[in-house]
Image (cartoon, rainbow, N blue to C red):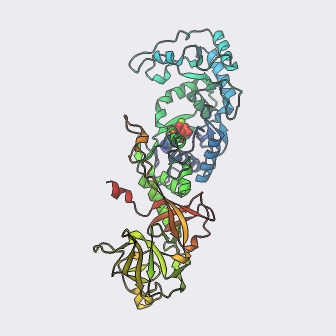
Amino acid sequence: MSEEKKSLNFIEQIIEEDLKTGLNPEKLRFRFPPEPNGYLHIGHAASICLNFGLGEEYNAPVNLRFDDTNPAKEEQEYVDAIKKDIQWLGFEWDQELYSSDYFQQLYNWAILLIKKGKAYVDDQTSAQIAEQKGTPTKDGEDSPYRNRSVEENLELFEKMKKGDFDEGSHVLRAKISMKATNMLMRDPIIYRVLKRSHHRTGSDWNIYPMYDWTHGESDYIEQVSHSICTLEFKHHRELYDWFLDQVYDENKLRPKQREFARRNLSYTVMSKRKLLQLVEEGIVNGWDDPRMPTISGLRRRGYTPKAIRDFSETAGIAKRDNVTDIALLEFHIKNELNKTAPRVMAVLNPVKLVITNYPEGKEEILIAENNPEDENAGTREMPFSRELYIEREDFREQANKKFFRLKLDKEVRLKSAYIIKANSVIKDENGEITEIHCTYDEDSRSGSGSEASKRRVKGTIHWVSIPHAIPAEVRLYDRLFTDEAPDSHKDKDFKEFINPDSLKIIDNAFVEPSLKPAKIGDQFQFQRLGYFNVDDDSTSDKLVFNRTVPLRDSWAKQNK
Ligand code: ATP
Ligand code: MG
């Protein structure tokens, strides 16, 4: 591995150094530790790709560990969704583990701390405790209960456990120092009373361990060699180490916490708490709404595991906070679908076009290439007739020279079909065009090899034959937020930046007949329009498509 040319990221460098200084490579072990209080998002994907990627690179096990210490917010639904998403991304965990399985062990260790005089029960309210905490420049104050006897602490802790005390009335605190420069070391709480049923342990416990206490000790129980977390835990490292010191046995491996910068993505928010708000307030239609930065939302939108993994790889991992441009994610899905998605024709804003010199009632089958980027993709049949739909935007009565689409008295090629020339229009009483009348050059059929077929015209437009067209609903998505960093504004709520036009539903689109058997999840390039997939809401009676991503990024043009 060290011989490889690829440059190592800083986490890999730390591991390499540990291996050089004596760590047995067989002891390498990683974990991905989600709290089951929401769905995974593209930020989690960074951590998943990092941890499972290290597992693959070093041939080391990676556990999936649910850090389920807060029964108030956790649910089985989230556990199931998290497992599904990780598998979908293509990773396999070694063991599925739960912090809640260690509640007894953690409790035993808490007793040990009390016996060593390193933990005490505090009867004060959280407000009183907060008041004594001090500030980074001012020492904290000792709790009046700090010097209770071991016996009294054991008795009170037992009562907390039995449910004799109300929530908020008693906590167990580590006895470290109220003068520590690191505020987290000022006698942190390790247990609180919570009379809540837990999704796995039911009503067994009336006390629950705090995250910091649980996390490091769980790493130790599982003998995780490198516990990789995000930067906001940097200050917690000292506490992580202090907790380990209390239980560490020299014959065992001592886990090491290291931090990397969270993945932030422009034009979205990434905290589960905020995503939950969007779901609960009905701003989006559930966690898998295609506008959400969740893995399930991206999947529904048409993102593939490969695109997400390629994105994570290119975006890399950093030591400092930063924002990754969402265009990078879009680049990766476009890049992949360009190679894999069959080309088809769909008209989203139809206007009728009549070829007046094409015989009435005649139909012919034209042959179109499925994917010029993939020589094995083959061809398909496209029925052609006298009446077609084209995009309303592809026609103008008059236009300047830069308009390469159809205009009166000018020619354009119908993709994979004939060259046509527009002659006249019919309008309704509001002046809106209802029909465009054209003539076609019978000898100009694409691929026929005739002189006329090789004739060069400036523009090519897509179309569908009206008698053969299938009606469809098409959902166009735009960024969910209008601001690049919606949750970075101190005086404004992130929801003030919701883009009111993030979803546009087109219910009178038409697609070519080859799409009739399309199934949920199938992906296509609608020629000239973008990449689309069949949405979960699609039925055999009504096809529903999502636009995964447009071919070109129109956002930059509109908003800069
Ligand atoms: P959120 O703030 O979104 O609720 P979290 O950190 O509370 O996220 P966890 O379930 O605790 O979510 O996260 C599981 C793992 O994923 C942790 O190791 C966490 O550090 C990592 N992680 C979470 N969000 C990101 C992110 N945006 N970028 C990289 N890693 C992340
Ligand atoms: Mg967390």
Q: Residue 237's spot in the image, x, y percent?
A: 50, 30
Above or below 536: residue 230 = above
Left or right of 35 in this view: 202: right
> How many numbered marks are there?
0
Residue 22 in sight from this viewpoint? no
Q: Foreground residue, 133 or 344? A: 344
| Residue pictured at 41% horizontal, 55% vertical | 327
Residue 525 in sight from this viewpoint? yes
| Residue pictured at 46% horizontal, 46% vertical | 317
Q: Residue 132's spot in the image, x, y percent?
A: 47, 15
Q: Quadrant of the C terminus?
A: bottom left
Q: Residue furthest front?
A: 429
Q: Residue 59's spot in the image, x, y percent?
A: 61, 49
Left or right of 408 in this view: 334: right
Left or right of 516 in this view: 466: left
Q: Residue 182's spot in the image, x, y percent?
A: 45, 23
Q: Ligand 2, what quadrant? A: top right
Q: Foreground residue, 276 or 188? A: 276
Q: Foreground residue, 505 or 369? A: 505
Above or below 97: residue 527 = below
| Residue pictured at 40% horizontal, 21% vertical | 136
Q: Residue furthest left?
A: 400
